[in-house]
Image (cartoon, rainbow, N blue to C red):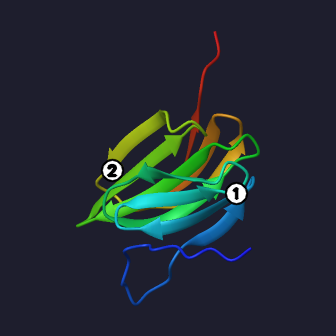
Amino acid sequence: MIKNFKTGNNYNRRIFLEFNKDKLYYESNSTLCYYDIKKKRFGNFSFKGELNDVKFDKNGNILIASSIKNRYYLIMYAPNSTILFYKEFNKKIENINFINEYSFYFRMENFIIIMSKILV
């Protein structure tokens, strides 16, 4: 099957395009869009500024790092588009990755920060 996607993105830089759990994810203007191959429908996840990194965990959660004008953003979405985590930083964040469900880490300057949901 061949499908034509209009991304609305004319940047001359790296464009994000990845398959994960029967969905094709691609970068558009301020959104991480997807096409669900099984359900044959489109969806998206919003972010601010320029997309820096995207990671997926085994449950379909999505971690998005973005930036605009020396402001850095980290957003974690559930597969149903619910925001599970949102934080703005004034220092550069990089090397994001999941540890396990609802736990992830990232680097800020010379520190590794671990974020984890506490279950009670």
Disc 2 marks a residue whose amino acid type is Phe
Residue at the spot x=38%, y=54% of the render?
A: 47
Residue at (53, 41) in percent of width and height? 77
- The earlier-in-sequence mark between 1 and 2 is 1
43 lies left or right of 70: right
The quarter of the rendered structure image containing the N terminus is: bottom right
Q: Is residue 28 rendered to the left or right of residue 94?
A: left
Residue occupying the point 59% across, 63% down: 25
Considering the image in quadrants, where does the C terminus appear?
top right
- Is residue 52 visible in the rendered image? The answer is yes
The total of numbered circles placed on residues is 2
State the SS at label 1. Answer: loop
Q: Which residue in the rendered view is the most extreme toward the bottom? A: 12
Q: Could you say where residue 80 lies in the image, as x and y percent from the top left? A: 57, 36
Asked whether residue 96 is in view, the answer is no
Q: Which residue lies under the disc numbered 2?
A: 89
Residue 53 at x, y = what percent? 52, 64
Gap between marks 1 and 2 measured at Cα: 35 Å
Label 1 packing within 10 angstroms: few (<14), some (14-19), many (20+): few
